[in-house]
Image: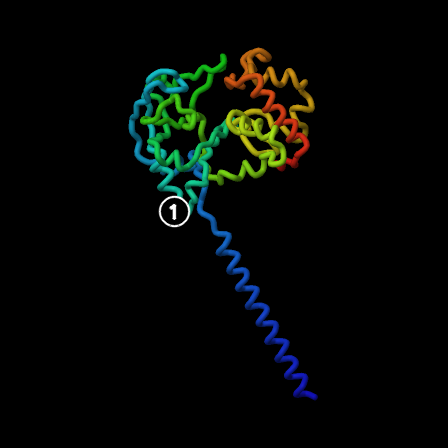
Amino acid sequence: MKTVKIKFFISCLFIFFLISCNKQKEQKTETIVNVQPETELDLLALKEKSKLGKDTVITVINDPVYHKTKKYHAVNALLLLKNEIDLSKVDIKNTSIIFECIDGYKPEMPLELFLKTNPFLAFKDVDAPKGSNWEKIVKNGNEMNADPFYLVYTSTSTDNQEYKWPYNVIKFRLESKNKNVEALQPKDDEVAMKGFALFQKHCITCHAINGIGGEMGPELNYPKSVTEYWKENELVDYIVDPASFRHKVKMPTLGITKQESQEIVKYLKYMSGKKIEVRK
């Protein structure tokens, strides 16, 4: 009887150790799978650590923000990105680079396109008045400056809207191209799809839907859709010409037609039925 009990005890110990080993192997595998390359650059933190790179003076012909030829003290943005992020671990063709700005503006462009340009991160305007880093930017009657960084190019046409020229930049972030599309695309509605394409092109850099997008302008869908508290015809007209509604409005004139604005509003109405709680 004792022999039987001992054998049973040994069998239980063996099973216990076997299960423990398997759990350790599973945990080890999960750890390896979850390893991700660093995909965000905090520019202010890099500046604090003197890791921005070598400073140089560059000239930009017909600067799209100041609308004239400008000179800046700047660092090579492409070299900075390559030094801080291991791009061999990034799916470049399917990745966007997002530029996060102080005011919540979040323009983006394909990472592949960014890597083919000659981008610089300007940190001081050569023409700035004494005691200031920047000449004032005047936009829709509002005065601003480009602090702390302004992304510029020396070999790119300023008319090409694929290239983004954000100022007040504080972070670079890499993100899958499909992330926003999958969350916001109205796959079951062809009419709303037209508005979605226009929203992606003109609106998402400043406005969010369900927390996805820029933060410069208000969230448009949660907890209430903008279509639930604006009269539809006035919302359409406002998107076409914001300055006709508000003095010194921050929203720019997008250069879209009334028909295109109506399609954007149709998309916003569609998304009003697809609310997702936005967590702070």
Residue 194 visible? The answer is: yes
The N terminus sits in image quarter: bottom right
On the image, numbered disc 1 is attached to which residue? 88
The residue lying toward the viewer, choosing from 147 and 200, is 200
Task: Please report the residue visible at 49 percent of the width from the left and 40 percent of the height from the top.
Answer: 176
| Residue 148 appears in view | no
Give the side of residue 80 with respect to residue 19, left or right: left
**In the depicted view, which residue is nearer to us: 20 or 233?**
233
In which quarter of the view is residue 188 placed? top right
Percent of width and height locating residue 121: 37, 30
Q: Residue at x 60, y 36 (%)?
A: 187
Please name the residue shown 42% across and 40% down the image: 93
Q: Is residue 258 above or below residue 150?
A: above
Q: Is residue 185 above or below residue 33?
A: above
Q: Amino acid at mark 1?
A: Ser
Give coordinates of residue 206: x percent, y percent: 53, 26
- The quarter of the picture where the C terminus appears is top right
Where residue 255 sits: x, y (%)? 50, 17
On screen, residue 225 above or below 52:
above
The residue depicted at 44 percent of the width and 26 percent of the height is 166
